[in-house]
Image (tube, helix red, strand yellow):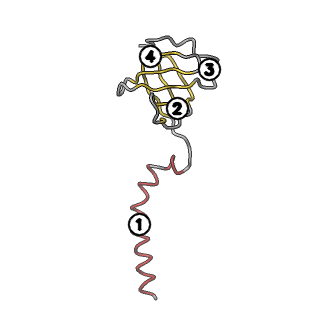
Amino acid sequence: MKRKLKYAIGIVLVLIPLLLPFVYKYKDYLNDKPIDKTVIGQVVENQDTYLIVRLDSDGLLCEAVKPDNLEDLSEFKVGDKVSITYSGGVLETSPGMFVEVSKIELVKE
């Protein structure tokens, strides 16, 4: 019995240092806090309630729905560079759709 207890304690003492970096790296995910991501792209289409943007990073088209803090999207014209901040993922639709858009801003070049 004592031998099994020693092995169990030894295993725990070995696993704790191995798991600490993982917990530290993914602590935001573990706390269920959304992590804001920002992407930059060029407006391809403006449909009043959403924008279709070609991302600078990979050239893919994505749809960004109007965030609650904006009245409308009329200030964004086709060809404008915009930054889009979102805290969800990207839906695998065509074009892709950002989930939980919190901010859309013009990028000054």
In the picture of the structure, the residue carrying the numbered disc 2 is 86
What residue type is disc 3 on?
Leu
In the picture of the structure, the residue carrying the numbered disc 1 is 15
In the picture of the structure, the residue carrying the numbered disc 4 is 44
The reply to whether the C-beta atoms of the residues labelled 2 and 4 are less than 8 Å apart is no
Q: Provide the secondary structure element on which disc 1 rests.
A: helix
Q: Provide the secondary structure element on which disc 2 rests.
A: strand
Mark positioned earlier in the residue sequence (1 or 4): 1
- Locate residue 108: give its quadrant: top left
- Locate residue 68: give its quadrant: top right
Q: Nearer the viewer, mark 1 or mark 4?
A: 4
Distance between mark 2 and mark 4 Cα atoms: 19 Å
Question: So how many labels did they put on this image?
Answer: 4
What residue type is disc 4 on?
Val
Location of residue 30 in the rendering, given as x and y in whole percent from the top left corner: 52, 51
The numbered disc on residue 70 is 3
Q: Residue at point 43% right, 64% down?
A: 16
Q: Nearer the viewer, mark 2 or mark 4?
A: 4
Q: Residue at point 39% right, 68% down?
A: 14
Residue toward you, 80 or 95: 95
Mark positioned earlier in the residue sequence (1 or 3): 1
Q: Residue at point 51% right, 29% down?
A: 85
Location of residue 65 in the rendering, given as x and y in whole percent from the top left corner: 56, 25
What residue type is disc 1 on?
Leu
Q: Nearer the viewer, mark 2 or mark 1?
A: 2
Mark positioned earlier in the residue sequence (4 or 3): 4
